[in-house]
Image (cartoon, grey):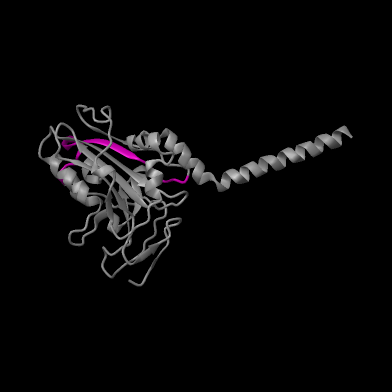
Amino acid sequence: MKNYRRSRSIKYLIIIVLLIGIVGYFNRGMITQNIQSLTTHSQVTNIDIKTDETSQPEKLANLNFNGQSVITVNNNQPTFSSDDLKQTKNGWQQLSSLDWLGRPQIANALLNKNLMPPAQKFKARERLTVKTPGYHAIKTGNNNTDWLYNRSHLIGYQFTGLNNEPKNLITGTRQLNADSRKNAESMVTFETEVADYLKQSDAHFVRYQVEPIYRNVELVPRGVHMMGQSIDDESIRFNVYIYNVQDGWEINYLNGDAKKVNS
């Protein structure tokens, strides 16, 4: 009888463990986001947590595109702390580890002209081979440049010369990465502003942060949150969120599939 009761208790224990595992699996996205919000060093997240249980990345992830590709965050004012803005002799870049889904996370840097690759190296830039999460080679036109997705750098190649690094590459639309339409803004708009400033002097430094924003367990980010602030002057100062969208296309952010829609 004792052995029967013990066997039945073990069966119940196994069932409870399995149920906990199943619940944890189906809520893994929320669990991961909570862990990330507790461990991130982003000053934006810390500030929002003081007044609201929803973190800044979660707020941005829940935004739906309304036709404006770039919106300002915190009235376009960066939220770096005084420690974040401390200047070092040579600048630096820091990439976060990939999360459990293989997705790149927040990237930080103190940019300086000395970190930028030489012009000759820039011209000889190697072809990107990293398959970013959710990436598909989808044509949007007949030209060789007409692709829906780019492998988009978080810290731009022109800043540090880092190229085929999985921690620094996301699946981004052409519209997010380098929108060539007249008066359009995209990541390259702010990257060019920073690069032009850095090239003016070896004494110019810019504190820089780019964070891909994901919704739950989706592989393709909904957008990127970019902040930049020059050290010792007001030349560079922005805090923006750029949607990862492409006009005329419907994107499945869960796996990167996309289809053309009637405009």
User: Residue 95: which quarter of the image?
Assistant: top left
- Residue found farthest to the right: 1
User: Residue 197: which quarter of the image?
Assistant: top left
* Of 58 and 115, the residue lying toward us: 58
- Residue found farthest to the bottom: 262
Highlighted magenta segment, given as a residue range: 101-119
Asked if residue 96 lies left or right of residue 119, the reply is right
Q: Residue at x 39, y 49 (%)?
A: 61
Which of the image's four quarters has the C terminus?
Answer: bottom left
The answer to whether residue 190 is magenta is: no
- Residue found farthest to the left: 200
Q: Position of residue 28 (x, y in %)?
A: 53, 44
Q: Position of residue 44 (x, y in %)?
A: 33, 37
Q: Residue at x 38, y 52 (%)?
A: 63
Q: Residue at x 42, y 58 (%)?
A: 256
Residue 6 showing in the rendered view: yes
